[in-house]
């Protein structure tokens, strides 16, 4: 009898312990708990920490509310019908106050059912509004438009867009070659224009220099007067007399020679 009572007491204690432990649940940091009662979603949402629940009747489904990252690769057509492959990184989070609605309407596979399709739609819709070159030159504008469209789509499904980063626009090989050829042509045209400008400047400098030299020569001619010529002749004659040693030349360039008078002496 005593043995039976002891066993019964032990079983009761075990049941009580099981009930006690089953009555409490813990929600980890960065998560919220969706309360399910017989599988039905309840309006109560458990925050981080320890919580009481009805044992065997209620279960708790944890859902992450921290910022999550999704990288996506999408191929679409630009406005000028160029094939564009876009690599994008999206940061988003689940609304902590609406995790029960998210679980009830979408479920735990919300990434594949909502996030990925929303990214694809936003990218394709935005890409179709720009030419291939504009996607490169107006990248910040394109990114902002994708972000705005994606934020509106995710908000309908109890999620918040944190940030978006377009990592890469990839085009076909033919388009890349066309862009390279265009850039080369533009660089050559710019070089030719610079050379032409340089030639024009050098020609203008030569014209200016020639004009200055002509003006200087003109001024010099204006300064030459008969008096100045006569004065120059006198200066030349004075220099010649200064160098003369007092002897006349023996022979000149004419037909009649000079007689050296000093050479004539009387012989006795």
Image: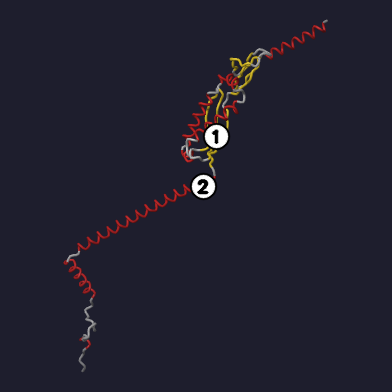
Above or below, comparing residue 101 to residue 208 in the picture: above
User: Looking at the picture, how far across and down is residue 61, in whole percent?
Assistant: 63, 20
User: Looking at the picture, how far across and down is residue 108, in whole percent?
Assistant: 62, 24
Above or below, comparing residue 148 to residue 259 in the picture: above
- Residue 88 — which label? 1
- Residue found 51% across the figure and 41% down from its top: 82
Looking at the image, which is closer to me, 162 or 232?
162
Which mark sits nearer the N-terminus, 2 or 1? 1
Q: Is residue 50 left or right of residue 224?
A: right
Above or below, comparing residue 139 to residue 63 in the picture: below
Q: Is residue 138 left or right of residue 71?
A: left
Looking at the image, which is closer to me, 78 or 210?
78
Q: Are marks 2 and 1 in contact (CB under 8 Å)?
A: no
- Residue 54 — which label? none
User: Looking at the picture, how far across and down is residue 101, in whole percent?
Assistant: 58, 19
- Residue found 56% across the figure and 19% down from its top: 98
Question: What is the crowding at mark 2: few (fewer than 14 residues within 10 Å), some, or many (at least 20)?
Answer: few
User: What colour scheme was applied to this rendering of the protein?
Assistant: secondary structure
Q: Quadrant of residue 23?
A: top right
Looking at the image, which is closer to me, 239 or 163?
163
Q: CA distance from mark 2 to mark 1?
A: 24 Å
Q: Secondary structure at mark 2?
A: helix
Q: Is residue 161 left or right of residue 57?
A: left
Quarter of the rendering occupied by the C terminus: bottom left
Q: Which residue is mark 2?
A: 177
Looking at the image, which is closer to me, 103 or 196?
103
């Amino acid at each position: 009898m005593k043995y039976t009572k002891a066993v019964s007491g032990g079983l009761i204690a075990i049941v009580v312990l099981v009930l006690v432990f089953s009555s409490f649940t813990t929600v980890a940091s960065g998560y919220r708990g969706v309360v399910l009662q017989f599988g039905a979603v309840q309006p109560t949402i458990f925050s981080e920490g320890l919580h009481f629940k009805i044992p065997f009747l209620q279960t708790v489904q944890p859902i992450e509310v921290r910022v999550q990252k999704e990288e996506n690769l999408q191929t679409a057509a630009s406005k000028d019908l160029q094939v564009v492959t876009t690599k994008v990184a999206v940061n988003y989070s689940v609304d902590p106050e609406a995790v029960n609605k998210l679980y009830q309407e979408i479920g735990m596979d919300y990434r594949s059912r909502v996030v990925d399709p929303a990214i694809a739609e936003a990218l394709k819709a935005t890409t179709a509004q720009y030419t291939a070159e504009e996607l490169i030159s107006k990248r910040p504008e394109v990114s902002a438009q994708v972000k705005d469209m994606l934020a509106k789509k995710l908000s309908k499904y109890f999620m918040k867009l944190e940030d978006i980063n377009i990592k890469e626009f990839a085009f076909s090989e033919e388009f890349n070659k066309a862009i390279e050829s265009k850039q080369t042509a533009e660089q050559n045209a710019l070089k030719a224009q610079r050379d032409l400008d340089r030639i024009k400047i050098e020609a203008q400098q030569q014209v200016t220099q020639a004009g200055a030299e002509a003006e200087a020569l003109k001024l010099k001619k204006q300064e030459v007067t008969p008096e100045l010529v006569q004065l120059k002749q006198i200066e030349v004659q004075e220099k010649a007399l200064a160098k003369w040693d007092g002897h006349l030349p023996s022979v000149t360039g004419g037909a009649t020679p000079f007689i050296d008078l000093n050479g004539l002496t009387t012989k006795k």
